[in-house]
Amino acid sequence: MDPPASLQAATGTIVAVVEADPWQRAYAELAARWPGTTLRGTTIRVSLPAGADPRSLLAESLSAVRVERIHVTDPSFEDAFLHLVH
């Protein structure tokens, strides 16, 4: 396994990618509850424990916004780095 892939696998996390309206409020709520939450444009990325159910974990934080989409992806190299420095 190459070093970036090793770093990504070592985090033990998944990333929930959230699109919501208004995105600013969604980001503020998620960042307050989940440290390491990041933005890419207006898309919110939340690192969660591997095996977690993102919809149930994020539901309370997203109750005041309209959720357009939540999908799960593996952590990017950037996500892995941020996870390790937090």
Image (cartoon, helix red, strand yellow):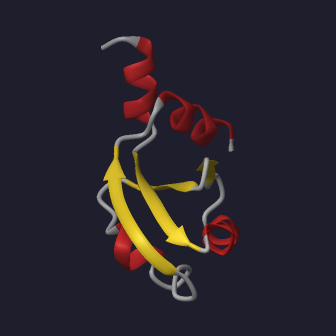
Could you say where residue 65 lies in the image, as x and y percent from the top left?
Answer: 55, 82
Tell me if residue 42 comes above or below residue 62 in the rendering. above
Q: How many marks?
A: 0
Tell me if residue 68 comes above or below residue 48 in the rendering. below
Could you say where residue 72 lies in the image, as x and y percent from the top left?
Answer: 33, 54
Tell me if residue 11 comes above or below residue 53 in the rendering. above
Q: Nearer the viewer, residue 7 or 23?
A: 23
**Which residue is drawn at the image coordinates 58% and 42% (left, top)?**
83
Lateral position of residue 58 relative to residue 29, left or right: left
Residue 48 found in image quarter: bottom left
Tell me if residue 86 comes above or below residue 18 in the rendering. above
Could you say where residue 59 lies in the image, as x and y percent from the top left?
Answer: 45, 81
Could you say where residue 26 lies in the image, as x and y percent from the top left?
Answer: 61, 72
Quadrant of the image containing the N terminus? top left
**Which residue is drawn at the image coordinates 64% and 66% (left, top)?**
27
Lateral position of residue 6 relative to residue 79, left or right: left
Quadrant of the image containing the C terminus? top right
**Which residue is drawn at the image coordinates 49% and 28% (left, top)?**
77
**Which residue is drawn at the image coordinates 63% and 71% (left, top)?**
33
